[in-house]
Image: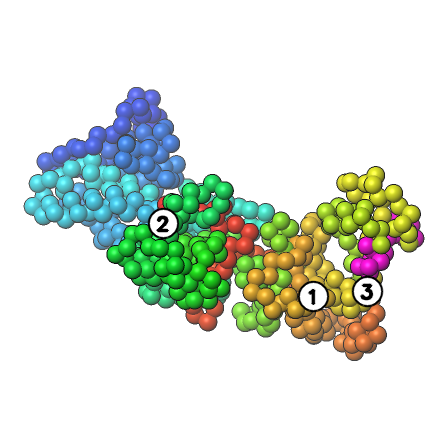
Amino acid sequence: MTRILIIASLLLLASCGSDTPPPSTEITSSPEEMKEKTTAYIRESLDYAGNHDGVLNDSFRLWQSAMLPALYETSGYGMLWSDPEKRKPIADSMLQFIRHAKYHALLPEDYHLNELQLIDSLYRADSLGKGARRDAALLGRADILLSDAFVRMVNHLRWGRLPDDSVSQRAAAPTAAFYAEQWQKFQREGSLSRLATELEPADTVYHAFKKALQRFLDESDQRVFTEVPLPGKNTDSATLRRQLVLRLQEEDWLAGENPDPDSATLAAAVKRFQESKGLTADGVAGSGTIRMLNLTDGEKFIRAAMAADRYKLLPSKMPERYLWVNLPSYYMRLIENDSVKLVSKIICGRQKTRTPLLNSAISEMITYPQWTVPTSIIVKEMLPAAKKDPGYFAKKGFSLLDGEGNEVDPYSVEWSKYSKGIPYRVVQGSGDANALGIMKFNFGNKYAVYLHDTNQRSLFGLTSRSLSHGCVRVQSWEGLMWDILKHDSMQASSGRYVPADSVRSWLGRKEKKVITVRNRLPLYIRYFTCEAKDGKLMFYDDIYGEDARIRPLYARK
């Protein structure tokens, strides 16, 4: 019956007053009147915000207005964070948590921090209870803002700020009942930190990341620095120079008394900065140097917040054993029971031929594989070369095969008539010179990519290794192979696995053999420009521009 009366009251409000914004001030004279008017204010405000895209007035907007009625129904729309005569301790706890939200990879400004601190200062200044403490509109507004902050914070702690992508495996979307449940839990326990721990990923990798984040925040310089524009066709050179000078002066790379240093002085300052960051010290403020200048501790925190949200896109429980490929780090890790069993350098796709993010499982290995060249490479690289010189295929060790597998003489083909593809397969035979190297690891995916060795092993010595057509080249392929074989032999029943001695023989004879992986190894290819290593946060280049793409979802620059 009570629920029916509440719904009827809401419908009545919606029909007669939803287009009138709630009052900005409403002074009361007694606790009873305060209770009555704050209840009315909260009802009217939620109704108005629900019909105006969360807007309360020109200064306030609710982010989770659709979810708030579920919280307030339990109190008959009375205040949740205060009593008529005093504020509850949970209100102070919530405000403190918001102030320190960065330790949970959250942004304090996302939770009405400025508005709540202003109201808090007015409340504390009115020690005699003659102004702010008597204003039902002010206290009702503070209550709603705290509730909105609570719901939004729960959302961000559990699901993050990123929308689902093609590989997301997180839990179902939030409901009003879920937020009401979390509110009840918070009221019972009185600890936001404990609630946060329950909402965030339980994975040990995430906990290590959180510890490293705390260390980073304790040691970081969160000052706001001048942003320097990247050089380009649309960049004004005078503006770039002016911003560069300001930025170098802010951290004393350049003396601050000269607003217009000569070119030699400026180059020397740039060189000092480059040397400190391990960059090529040529004194030229190119794109790489400017990106590093702009990667301040403040921006690094945003990177960390993005990484935290990417963790929340992962399954709530990771497998006991899995392969983790982090593209921006150029590293692969084999994880078993929360321990790293194998680490390997990788080479991933170029900017134009990106390695896709995916979830899969290694299902087979192939010794001394043949490489069937993808159509995209044939069209972009091989066809133009064949039109100039049909001998290109022989020089590169490729064979041209028709639909029946017969070899075709490249000189017999009229290459000029093809532009979007050719009616032949281009195959590179197995051997030490094969682009796939000695071993190929297959896993189901719609992108026709795989892990493999390479015949260009010197490239693993480079710092930046986004060089492939999309597949992932693995330096420690042999260690991965032996671990997979060992795991198969330990887990499979007698006679259902390939003995290690057989594989050694095939490798020694350079034979092509397909090895079925009985206990498929889960594989996650991901994009994290920030992760924890040895207790510290590591930051990597945004090689595919994914951080730049999602940057607007985070704090304003």
Spatial CA span between label 3 and label 1? 15 Å
Q: Quadrant of the N terminus?
A: top left
Q: Nearer the viewer, residue 555 or 18?
A: 555
395 to the left or right of 443: right
Residue 299: tell me if it is visible.
no
| Cα distance between the residues tagged 3 and 2 | 55 Å
Q: Earlier in the sequence, mark 1 or mark 2?
A: 2
The amino acid type of the residue labelled 2 equals Gln
At horizontal 63% and vertical 55% (from top left) the residue drawn is 349
Density class for disc 2 (Cα within 10 Å; few <14, some 14-19, many ≥20) is: some
Nearer-the-camera pick, 332 or 347: 347
- As helix, strand or loop, the secondary structure at mark 2 comes to helix
Number of dots carrying numbers: 3
Look at the picture and state if 20 lies above or below 118. Answer: above
Q: Nearer the viewer, residue 4 or 279?
A: 279
Residue marked by disc 3: 430
Q: Check residue 456 in the rendering and tell me which mark sits there, or answer none.
A: 1
Is residue 430 placed above or below 354 in the rendered structure? Answer: below
Image mark for residue 243: 2
Q: Are marks 3 and 2 in contact (CB under 8 Å)?
A: no
Please give the label number shown on residue 232.
Answer: none
* Residue drawn at the location 16% of the way across and 37% of the way down: 135
Would you say the residues marked 3 and 1 are in contact, meaning their CB atoms lie under 8 Å apart?
no
Q: Which residues are magenta?
A: 392-406
Sooner in the amino-acid sequence: mark 3 or mark 2? 2
The answer to if 402 sits in the magenta stretch is yes
- How has the structure been colored for display? rainbow
As shown in the figure, which amino acid type bears the numbered disc 1? Gln
Residue at the far top in the pictured view: 16
Nearer to us: label 3 or label 1: 1
